[in-house]
Image (cartoon, rainbow, N blue to C red):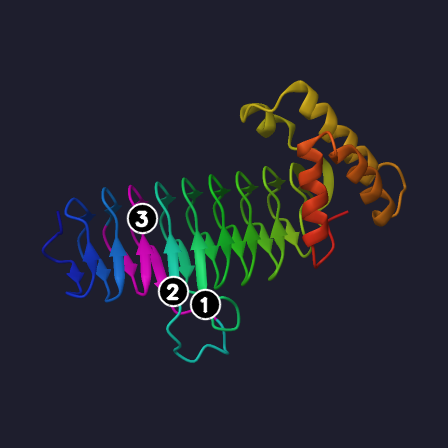
């Protein structure tokens, strides 16, 4: 299952059914789980762990040194889960000791061509990054978020679960869960209603989230006042409670 022109380190740990295409390079400290398919001209550097059932397309660069001038060769790592699709020319870098020393990508993510995940980013599960979407260092992207083409996320920002970021957006503050932001500069445009419907959110939950959006963005309340109202609703509405929890963890404020 390994093409004769591929270069695979004897120190790499590779499941027996892994496919590695022509001219790919698998370095020492790399672990690749069952059923993963790696196309031609892919480079995977360690320490990197790839789970099961991933598909990596040609010319991707996985586990390269972080693009951080403070990096001094420390042994940091990249951890990628199961069932991810990583398309052509994607780049995913290892972490730095200035953070936790690890970049993490979860399960079932769809990373389109030319996307970049920088050092110390944490990407959850079932995230979609469209062509040329870029994460700077230390960005956290929660489950089911969608980042449209050519959007760029500033370092240390957080992108909430089930949110939608429009194309060409430059994100410099946190994006709340369930929300849609778009435009230049980015502005809130409502809840991600279509995405939430596809994921099984009920009409009642959608109504609750629309009311949360109204409180946050249409009531002329200060953010601290809006949070108090949302906290009261969140006692009986778990989806709204998730917004409050995200607000309490936000360090860069929110797109508002």
Instruction: Indicate left or right for 171 with 188 as reference.
Output: left
Q: Which residue is mark 2?
A: 77
Instruction: Indicate left or right for 193 with 83 as reference.
Output: right
Between 163 and 13, the one nearer to me in the picture: 13
In the rendering, at what x and y percent does residue 37 appear?
24, 45
Q: Secondary structure at mark 2?
A: strand
Label 2: few (<14), some (14–19) or many (≥20) C-alpha neighbours in 10 Å: many
Which residue shows up at 39% across the image and 78% down it? Answer: 73
Q: Secondary structure at mark 1?
A: loop
Which residue shows up at 59% across the image and 44% down it? Answer: 167
Residues at discs 2 and 1 in contact (Cβ within 8 Å): yes
Q: Earlier in the sequence, mark 2 or mark 1?
A: 2
Give the number of the disc on residue 51: 3
Chain part drawn in magenta: 40-67
In the rendering, at what x and y percent does residue 135 appear?
53, 56
Q: Which residue is mark 1?
A: 101
Which residue shows up at 74% across the image and 34% down it? Answer: 235
């Amino acid at each position: 299952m390994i093409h004769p022109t591929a270069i695979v380190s004897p120190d790499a740990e590779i499941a027996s059914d892994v496919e590695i295409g022509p001219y790919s390079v698998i370095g020492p400290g790399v672990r690749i789980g069952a059923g993963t398919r790696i196309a031609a001209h892919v480079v995977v550097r360690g320490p990197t762990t790839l789970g099961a059932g991933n598909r990596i397309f040609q010319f991707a660069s996985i586990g390269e040194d972080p693009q951080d001038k403070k990096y001094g060769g420390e042994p940091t790592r990249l951890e990628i889960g199961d069932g991810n699709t990583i398309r052509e020319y994607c780049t995913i870098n290892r972490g730095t000791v200035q953070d936790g020393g690890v970049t993490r990508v979860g399960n079932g993510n769809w990373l389109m061509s030319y996307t970049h995940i920088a050092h110390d980013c944490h990407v959850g599960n079932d995230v979609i990054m469209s062509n040329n979407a870029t994460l700077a260092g230390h960005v956290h992207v929660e489950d089911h978020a969608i980042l449209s083409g050519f959007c760029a996320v500033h370092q240390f920002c957080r992108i909430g679960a089930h949110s939608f970021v429009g194309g060409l957006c430059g994100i410099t503050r946190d994006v709340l869960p369930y929300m849609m932001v778009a435009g230049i500069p980015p502005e809130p445009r409502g809840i991600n209603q279509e995405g939430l419907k596809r994921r099984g959110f009920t009409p009642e939950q959608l109504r609750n989230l629309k009311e949360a959006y109204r409180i946050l963005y249409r009531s002329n309340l200060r953010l601290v006042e809006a949070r108090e109202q949302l906290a009261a609703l969140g006692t009986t509405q778990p989806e709204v409670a998730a917004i409050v929890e995200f607000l309490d963890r936000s360090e860069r404020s929110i797109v508002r």
